Amino acid sequence: MKVCLVNTNVNLLTPDFLRFEIQPGLVSIGAVLEKNGFTVEIVDLKLLILENNWKADGHIFKKAASFIAGKDPDLVGINTRCDSFPTAINIAKALKDISPKTPVALGGIQATFVGKETMEAFPFVDFILRGEAEYSFAELAGRIQKKGSLRNIKGLTYRKDGDIIENPAPALFPGLDNLPEPAYHLYKSQLASPELNARREIYIDAGRGCPYHCKFCVCHKMYNGKYRLKSPGKVVSEIKNLKNTYGINGFNIGADHFLVDKKYVKRFCELLIRENLGITWCCSARPENIDEEILRLMKKSGLFSVFLGIETGSETVQENIGKRLRLENIMPLMELLDSLEIFTVAAFIAGFPEETEKDINDTLMLAVDCSKFQNVYCEIRELAAMAGSAVYDRVKDSLRRAGFFNDIADGPLSGIPANMALVKKYPRLFSVFYSVPLKSMTPRLLHETVRFYNNALHHFPLSIKTALEELKIRPVKLFKLFRIWARKEGLSGGGNFLPSHADIINSFPGFLKDEYKKNGIPAAFINLILKTETAGAKSRLEAAASVITGLGEENTGRIMERVLKTKSGRVKQDRE
C-alpha cells in the first residue's frame, strides 16, 4: 500500500530568502509507516513551486493535486497549520475532483482543533487525525488496506452512514525515544541539494509540549499539558547521523522551551562537545530559565542563536495572558547574550484584547531598548486568534476582516481568490486571517504601527531611542507623526497608509530632521546617529563610536553614557 504525505506549509518563495524546511511531523509519521510495511512518499508544495517555477495563482491547487494523483496513492495525508489551512483544503478538494476514490486525511494542529467543523464544511475530507498521529495514521492505513473497522482508532474523526464520528482523544506516547528515527531519506534529494539547502540547516524534533499556560498559544492544549523531550543521547545521535549522511551543519533544536531542565541541557551540551561534530545549533527558551553558566556551556557546544518569547512589555498584560515574566530581568539578559555574541530573537506580540495604548507603548519601548544590542533582533507580531487557544475561545464570535493580513497569515498563497473565498465563508475555521478586536486602537493603526517598527528598528535603533527621548513622546505617537509626515510627502498609496519597507528606510531620516526642526530641538546629535546608521554601521558600538568622533573627544564621556549600553542595559534618559 502506498501512502502520500503532503506538506502545504509555504512561507517565503523569494529565492533570496529561500530556506528549505524539513517537516518534522511528516518524516516522523513516514518512519512509522515504513516500519509497518507501507511505501511512503512526501510531496512538498513549496518544493513543487520552486522546482517547477509555478506561479502562485489559482491554478496551483489543480497542479499540485495532479502531481499527487500521478503518484497513484492508496491514502493521502495532508498536514495543516493555521496559516496554510485554506491551501490544504483547496488541494484536498482538487485531489478529490481528480481522484474521487482516493481517501484524504488531514492532521496537524489546525485540524486537531477544528476537526469536526472541517468535516461538516468540506465533504471531500474523509478523515481527521487529532493530536500525535504517528501510530494512529499507520493504524488507519492498515484498516483501509484490510477494510477493517475504524471505531477504535484513537484520535480519528471519520464519516459513517452520513454521520461524523469522533473517536476518543489519543493518549500521548509514553516516551519520544520509542519513536523510530525520522525518515529524513524521504527528503534525500533536497537535503543533498546546495541550491535548496544552501545554509545546510535542519529542524530536529527534540521535544513536544509546554509546561506553561499562555492564553494565545495552543501548545499546552495540543499535548495535554505535558512536556516531553527525547533523551540527550537520542537527539545527538540524530544530529550525528544527519551530519555524516547529508553534511548538515546547522540544527534547530525543536522544543518550545528547551531550557526547562538545565540538567538535561547540560548533558546534551556535554555530549555535543565530546562528539566534536563541528556543528552549530539554536533553540527556544523562556528568559527566566537562562543563566550565564548554562549559556557559556551551550555556546561552547555550538549554540549560535536563541529565540526568546517575551511577548509584552506590560506587567499587566504579562499577567493577563498567563506569561508572567519578570520584565526587570529582560535587559540584563539581553546584555549577557549580546556580550557572549549569541544571536537572539526577542519576540513580541501586540494587540491583545485587553491592551491599552499604554500597554502597547510599553511593549514597543521594550523592543526599542532590546534593539540597541548588536546581536539582538526584535520581532514584533500582531496577535492572531489561533484555534484551540484561550484567546480564540474568547474572541471567536467577534472576529473582524480588516482588509489586510497580519504577519502570520500573510503568506505567498494567502491572497489567491479560492483561498480568500474559504476565509470569508468560514471565519472560525480560518480565524488567523481575521483581526482580534482591540479597544484602544483600530486594527489598521495597530497593523501599521507594528509594520513600521518591525522595519525601522532593524535600521535605526539608536535614532528611534534618541528621538523618543528628545521629542518626549512614546512609540505609537512617533509612528502617528511619521504617518502624517509621509502622507504630506506623498508616500501613501491612497486613503490608508501602509508604509513599504523601502519607504520607511528611505524616508525616516528626513522625517526625523523635519520633526526636530519643527520642535526647535538641536539636531547635531540625532543627525550624526542617522548618518552612521544610514551608512550601515557594522555594530551599535561602531555607530556610537562614529557619533563620538563626530562630536569631538571632549564629549566622549557624555555620549558613551547616553548611547552605549550601561550595566543596567539602558540608555541614559537625560540629555546634558
Image (spheres, rainbow, N blue to C red):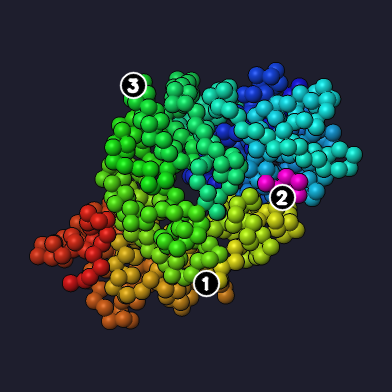
Question: Which of disc 1 and disc 2 is earlier in sequence?
Answer: 2
Discs 3/2, front: 3
Q: Residues within 10 Å of mark 1 (few under 14, many from 20)?
A: some
Left or right of 462, for residue 206? right
Q: Position of residue 322 (x, y in %)?
A: 50, 54
Amino acid carrying label 1: it is Ser
Toward which corner of the image does residue 425 lie, by quadrant? bottom right
Q: Is residue 117 magenta?
A: yes
Left or right of 129, for residue 530? left
Query: In the rendered image, which residue does mark 3 sit on?
Result: 274
- The magenta span reads 113-118
Amino acid carrying label 3: it is Arg
Left or right of 168, for residue 27? left
Toward which corner of the image does residue 5 lie, by quadrant? top right
Q: Position of residue 454 (x, y in %)?
A: 44, 58
Is 363 above or below relative to 16? below
Q: Secondary structure at mark 2?
A: loop
